[in-house]
Amino acid sequence: MTDGRWETRRRVRWGECDPAGVVYTPRFAEYVADAFHEYLEYLLGAPLQRSLEALDVSTPCKALRFVFHHALHPDDELALAVGVAAIRTRTFDLAIEGRLAGELAFEAVFTAICVHHTVRKSREIPPRLRERLEWDRARVSR
């Protein structure tokens, strides 16, 4: 964990890079989406899709924002730290930092919107998910 935030790691694969050996920009969205899903699985304590279905919720991306600080290359070991940035009625933001050997490579904010799993209409954040998001935000801010 970094500063108490939940963390995951991944290694940059050669196929994620252009011929010059630099990660393609769209791959960063995949890194962030993967970290988002792993983080929700951590919060809910069970396989993600089963947990979301039980809560009658899906969490598609409403917005995604990046600031890039450093290029990534094949075999770079990327640490992704995830923390709750905001919780609203139907949406929440996760702040995600990607670091190489402690150096900031990129920052991202992933905004998820909650929708009913079956009818695909927006809904309030389910109480269990809200409780877990608030718990983790409080835990990190101590």
Image: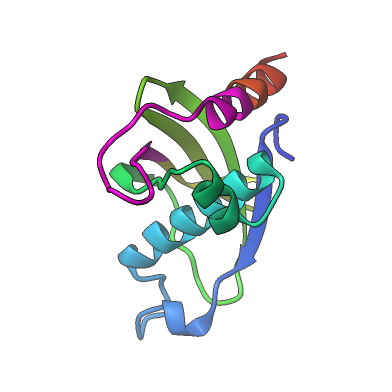
Vertical placement of 29 versus 6: above or below? below
**Magenta stretch contains residue 126:** yes
Does residue 101 appear in the picture of this structure? no
Q: From which residue to which does the magenta span run?
A: 109-133
Question: In percent of the image, x 65 and y 26: which residue is there?
Answer: 136
Q: Position of residue 47 (x, y in %)?
A: 65, 57
Vertical placement of 61 versus 92: above or below? below
Quadrant of the rendered structure where residue 91 is? top left
Vertical placement of 99 versus 3: above or below? below
Q: Nearer the viewer, residue 136 or 105?
A: 136
Q: Is residue 90 left or right of residue 84?
A: left
Q: Position of residue 24 (x, y in %)?
A: 35, 70
Which corner quadrant holds the N terminus? top right
Q: Nearer the viewer, residue 6 or 20?
A: 6
Q: Nearer the viewer, residue 25 or 60?
A: 60
Question: In percent of the image, x 34 and y 51: which residue is there?
Answer: 118
Does residue 13 appear in the picture of this structure? yes
Check the image and name the residue furthest to the top: 142
**Magenta stretch contains residue 10:** no
Vertical placement of 58 versus 86: above or below? below
Q: Position of residue 99 (x, y in %)?
A: 58, 49
Q: Position of residue 119 (x, y in %)?
A: 28, 48
